[in-house]
Amino acid sequence: MAKDRGRRMTEWVHPMTSTVTAARTRSLPRSTRIVWRVSTVLWSGGVAAGLLGASGAGMGLRVAGLIVCAAGSLRLSSLLFWTFFCMIAGVELGLDAPYAAAQTHFLADLFLRLIRMIVAPLLFATITTGIAGHGQLRSIGRVAVKALIYFEVVTTLGLVIGAAAISLSGAGWGVHLTGAAAVPPAAQAPQTWQQILLNIFPENVAQAVAQNQILQVAVFSVLFATALAMLPEAKRAPLFSVLQSLGVVMFQLTRIVMWLAPLAAGAALAYTVGAVGLRAMIPLANLGITYYAALLAFTILVQLPSLLLFRIPVGRFLSAVGEPASIGFATTTSEAALPLAIERMEEFGVPRWIVSFVIPTGYSFNLTGSSVYLSVAAIFCAQAAGIHLSAGRLVAMLAILMLASKGVAGVPRAGLVVLLATASAIDLPTAPILLILGIDTLMDMGRTLMNVVGNCIASAIIARSEGELSLSAPTE
């Protein structure tokens, strides 16, 4: 009965789910495919001309390719397509007109403000109605235990895989530290485990909303929903109906705001490329390659087997997470992808009461991309400083990093802030950490993408373990 009620609720919130799914799988018109081929030829020719020294002609061809692609795709409503198109256009703008690119950064800031405006009421509405409507409080506690166990296992594996990757590549050995001249983000004192536990619970819910403390809002919502579920039906129904309507409104507002996501992604990349260019620094390039190799290893060795073990269709899952993952990748903030990730996983078949609890909680406890980042960056810094780590010291370092990373919001440079905060605790000099600033944005993209995908995987796995994953929605 509870399961049927949950399905009906999801169908009510997303009445166009089957239409959206069918639209995504519909084949592209022949004219669109032809336009894409022409634009690809023009853009590739522009790249080749630029490499041969004809920078003016190359820029003209690349811009023409982008214009042809945009003009021929105006009828396409795919958020994923337009996000990647604007990312490419943003890189082009940053390379060709850095001053103009610097003026577009307000679009990314505007998008993030709108997302922050949505997150707290969206979480409150979805968690409250999900738990109170589910009616089985024991299930919530069971899901919480399963989620925390899963989070700790995968983040530990992320730390280990990152440490193994950087130890094998030795990217930090022989680095010269004299050229690092960048202003780091402000470091914060590392928290004790008691402080971390205490900070999970808000002392003022309005303050938690104002400071965008996602985990605190989620905890308040769970407690509020539990109290609401314990009331008699007659007293619960009026407030429950209002909260259901609030959830519907917030999802509709999310869809409106998400139309700005491609512009925000393009503006963020334009600003970054215009500021630092594409100049390569060999040690940092080696670090970046090592980091993305570690992410690939984590995907193959941990995430893919997890999906297969719990019989989750990989193709359908990748289709569901494509849009939120691309938004997180381009904006380098998991927060920007949160509303869309919740919506897409509901469409995938994860019940609201699970997805609205697991994903927000995972944003503090299941930062798999951040775990890989921290171990890679910390050992790179040790190598750059000429420090040889013994096995015992390495284990102690990873344990401190795991503890320090909990409760860190999925915002840009959060990993670097944690590393700076724990540098003294793990006996690392700060000079090598400043060097990472040259490539931190590129690493942040992979970190955020992995955080978003990892939490979507967690919600699907927890739903499958509870027997609540519904994959009966049509795929064509």
Image (spheres, rainbow, N blue to C red):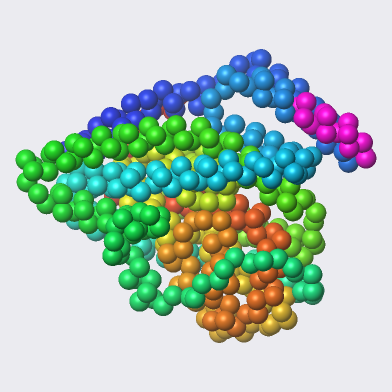
Quadrant of the image occupied by residue 160: bottom right
Residue 171 appears in the rendering? no
Residue 62 on the magenta span: yes
Classified by dominant secondary structure, the portion drawn in magenta counts as helix
- Residue drawn at x 21%, y 53% as measured from the top left: 224
- Residue drawn at x 49%, y 76% as measured from the top left: 189
Where does residue 309 sit, x and y in percent of width and height?
Answer: 43, 51
**207 left or right, relative to 292:** left
* The one of 408 and 377 positioned closer to us in this rendering: 408
| Rendered position, 84 above or below 222 | above
| Rendered position, 327 above or below 393 | above
* The one of 360 and 464 positioned closer to us in this rendering: 360
Where does residue 73 sit, x and y in percent of width and height?
Answer: 63, 22
> Where does the C terminus fall, quadrant-wise?
top left
**238 left or right, relative to 109:** left
* The one of 251 and 27 positioned closer to us in this rendering: 251
Q: How many marks?
A: 0
| Rendered position, 288 above or below 384 | above
**286 left or right, relative to 11:** right
Where does residue 341 sit, x and y in percent of width and height?
Answer: 44, 43
Residue 417 appears in the rendering? yes
Residue 10 on the magenta span: no
- Residue drawn at x 45%, y 44% as measured from the top left: 115
Residue reaching furthest to the right: 53
Where does residue 20 sit, x and y in percent of width and height?
Answer: 44, 26
Quadrant of the image occupied by residue 443: bottom right
> Where does the N terminus fall, quadrant-wise?
top left
Which portion, as a residue range, is magenta? 52-65
- Residue drawn at x 25%, y 34% as measured from the top left: 245
